[in-house]
Amino acid sequence: MEEKEILKVDHLTKKYEDLTVLEDISFSLKKGEVVVVVGPSGCGKSTLLRCINGLEEIQDGKVSIEGKTGMVFQSYDLFPHLSVLQNLMLAPLKVQKRKKEEVQKEAEQLLERVGLLAKAKQYPRQLSGGQKQRVAIVRALIMHPEVLLFDEVTAALDPEMVREVLDVIMDLAKQDKTMLIVTHEMAFARAVADRVIFLDGGSVIEDTDPENFFGSPRTERAKRFLRTFEFESVNAS
Amino acid sequence: MGFEVLLKGKNPVRLLAGLGVALRISLISVVISILLGLIIGTLMTMKNPLIHAVSRIYLEIVRIMPQMVLLFIVFFGFTKMTGHNLSAEVSSVIVFSFWGTAEMADLVRGCLTSIPAIQYESSKALGLSRVQTYRYVIIPQIIRRLLPLSINLITRMIKTTSLIMMIGIVEVLKVGQQIIEANRKTSPHAAFGVFAAIFILYFLACWPISCLSKYLEKRWEN
Ligand SMILES: Nc1ncnc2c1ncn2[C@@H]1O[C@H](COP(=O)(O)OP(=O)(O)O)[C@@H](O)[C@H]1O
Ligand SMILES: [Mg+2]
């Protein structure tokens, strides 16, 4: 099977005034590939996703996408004045001008799939954090994006709700969705990723498969980064 | 008890007409305040330092100055300065709009800045245009926050109109005083009945508005 490149980031540089946040970043995603981006806080992960979907201007380089992106953010961003179903249907109806019955049917199917069909008529304030994030994922999905971007979508959640959201993303990976995922959940990263990109100080330090990255990281910086998670797992066991 | 004067002659009609004057002045002022408040409040969210400074001074003046002083300044001061007479009603509309616009602008500014940036960003990420984002996402949220607050402003306006008798407008409170004065000999206790009636009139005017505001707030709370 010929694997088509869906997303290509080419020598991307992003600055805020004098501060260079991303420097000469290059990588690409093939169709159906799941790439996880990890790195210490403040290294530019969110900025990278925001540059890819056009929320930020870039100063140098190029981002090319075959089609469009969908994004799920860390903070809850559902529209509070709209019900779950209305949140899901707004963009398909207004942006894609699709038929109402068709969109509603798909919205309900997707809600069913993430176990939230019963919440269709409810408002975001009536949902838990985990439920909100699952709805946000569905809201991105229903636009049929070629690439899904996830920016630490479980970081603001209570621990007991992390799993239900990660399960949904795992399920998407099984359906061969193309995804670029920023996460701090290392076990999840290892399980879901086809490739791991380690970002530090605004540059790609490693771009490799998960076994290599987690098993035998090449660089000192990656080793140091991974060690910061060891305490957690020692504690947990 | 003094209730008998209420039904004497044209008194009930006069009292109602007095309330009508108060309601008319407040409603005109509220409409002006809301329109100007929307514009000025929106301007205030821009990061222009001049607009920022001017609006700060404006808000401070309104906050510090008693409405009564403003009324006197406009009603008497304008005449002194220009030689033209400004009617008492126009003066009070000017003062209440001046005050109401400041209140409204501050509410609008507060609502606009309280919409998190992520609402704009996720709209954009979903492909909504700027116009669509405002139409379907931002403005509905602002209206939901603003409407109960602006309705509240109406009741506060109505209450404050009791000041306008100080510049000679015969509104409900003034009518009450006139009735009490005219009946001092025959009904020495008229004051109680008259003020009780005025209390009820104010209540009947403001209570439904206040209920509507509470209802909307409840219904739309996020
Ligand atoms: N709007 C902005 N203006 C200036 N600097 C910013 C802005 N947004 C992010 N930064 C800076 O860019 C760097 C990377 O931020 P971010 O992409 O949010 O990191 P991460 O998501 O990896 O934690 C940080 O140093 C941050 O302070
Ligand atoms: Mg981030």
Image (cartoon, rainbow, N blue to C red):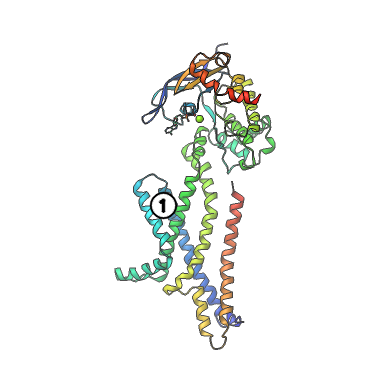
**Which residue is nearer to you in this view: B85 or B62?**
B62
Which residue is more in the foreground, A126 or B20? A126
Residue at the image point whose x is 59% and y is 48% from the top: B221
Q: Residues within 10 Å of mark 1 (few under 14, many from 20)?
A: many
> In this rendering, is residue B103 above or below A66?
below
Does residue A6 appear anywhere in the picture? no
Is A110 situated left or right of B21 in this image? right
Amino acid type at circle 1 is Ile
Image coordinates of residue B130 in percent, x first then y, are 46, 38
Q: How far across and how far down the image is residue B50, in percent?
A: 34, 48
- Residue pointed to by mark 1: B40
Q: Quadrant of residue A15?
A: top left
In this picture, is B191 found above or below A60? below
| Residue extending farthest top | A1
Q: Secondary structure at mark 1?
A: helix
Q: Is residue A134 visible?
A: yes
Q: Position of residue A207 (x, y in %)?
A: 50, 16
Q: Position of residue B135 (x, y in %)?
A: 50, 43
Q: What residue do we see at 41% from left, 73% from top?
A: B167
Pick the residue in front: A19 or B222.
A19
Image label count: 1
